[in-house]
Amino acid sequence: MLRKKNNLVLLYKPENISSFKALYSVKRGLGMKKVGHTGTLDPFACGLMVVLTGQYTKLAQYFEASEKRYRTVVKLGVETDTLDTEGDVVATSEYLPSIEEIKDSVARHLGVIQQMPPIYSAIKIDGRRAYDYARSGKEIEMKSREVFVKEISILNYEDGLLELDILCGKGTYIRSLARDIAKGAGTVGHLVFLERTMVGGFFSSDAVVPDEFDSSKVIDVSKDIFADKLGILSLDLKQEYLENVKHGKALRDEFFYQKMDDEALYSVFLEERFIALVRKGTDNISYEGVFLEDEDI
């Protein structure tokens, strides 16, 4: 039996290890060198990583663009330079806001907002990661950017510890959001716990921890995954046109059983096997990617 090169894995990264180290279990278990994921988690954080291997790494952009949900605990009254437990204290405040003040601040951080990313982040500035500058002590100017925060629920607030559930869009830094909510409530704060619980409709409860991963834990990419998790509809390819797709020949409407709308992205299946992503334009159909196993070629 041939080992699949294209795989989807839901991995649960434990606390206090890097995302890179967590991926090693997948590389070893599948015998793969090319392994990608849909968003790094800081070492102190835990939670869901959607892992992609082989040609499926080309799908990362679609998962990265989807909504993500986090559960976090913010310690009010203390701010660190990393905005989490790994940094040095840079500010303190004896003031602990009321729940009403916190609710008001939360409400002001919903929707499309401007956010200043943490200096300890992987954002590139002049070809270098921001955290490289921060670790070397060099001062740099971080630029704010627009992010979307869909929901923030207050789960608990006791003894200066604020527990939140957050649903947000691509590029949102939960560390920055916690800092800004604390500031908006008249104090300072940093994260003491962070868990990513959802990525694009996938949930951390369905993920496997690195120590328990083996090749049986891969997930078949189905039409339901594209429709329910990514909002991408599917097409069924007619068998006689498989060779055309294999060789990247021009696509035509008659290759598929379904009729396509203009300017839409579609996943293409052959007898329940995912083989391609295509985009219908106003006057053509183009390939976004072809995903064939060795036995298909």
Image (cartoon, rainbow, N blue to C red):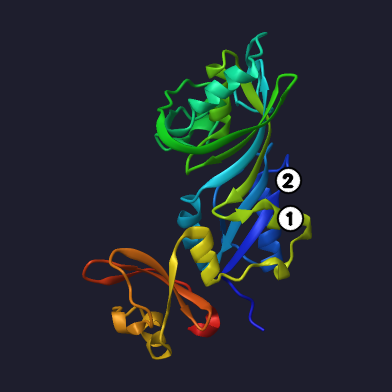
Seen as rendered, the residue at the extreme top is 94
Q: Are marks 2 and 1 in contact (CB under 8 Å)?
A: yes
Give the answer, above or below, for where 149 lies relative to 289. Answer: above
Q: Residues within 10 Å of mark 2 (few under 14, many from 20)?
A: some
Q: Quadrant of residue 288?
A: bottom left
Circle 1 SS class: helix
x 50%, y 65%: residue? 226
x 49%, y 51%: residue? 66
x 40%, y 27%: residue? 143
Q: Residues within 10 Å of mark 1 (few under 14, many from 20)?
A: some
Q: Residue 216's x, y, as percent?
A: 72, 70
Side of 140 relative to 216 (left or right): left
Side of 215 relative to 274 (left or right): right
> Residue 14: which disc?
2
Q: Nearer the viewer, residue 219 or 260?
A: 260
The answer to whether residue 80 is seen in the rendering is no
Q: Residue 206's x, y, as percent?
A: 69, 58
Q: Residue 10's x, y, as percent?
A: 65, 58
Identify the residue under disc 1.
210
x 49%, y 21%: residue? 138
Amino acid found under the numbered disc labelled 1: Pro
Q: Nearer the viewer, residue 52 or 107?
A: 107
Q: Quadrant of residue 263?
A: bottom left
Side of 203 relative to 138 (left or right): right
Q: Residue 98's x, y, as percent?
A: 64, 15
Label 2, label 1: how far apart the Cα atoms are: 8 Å
Amino acid found under the numbered disc labelled 2: Pro
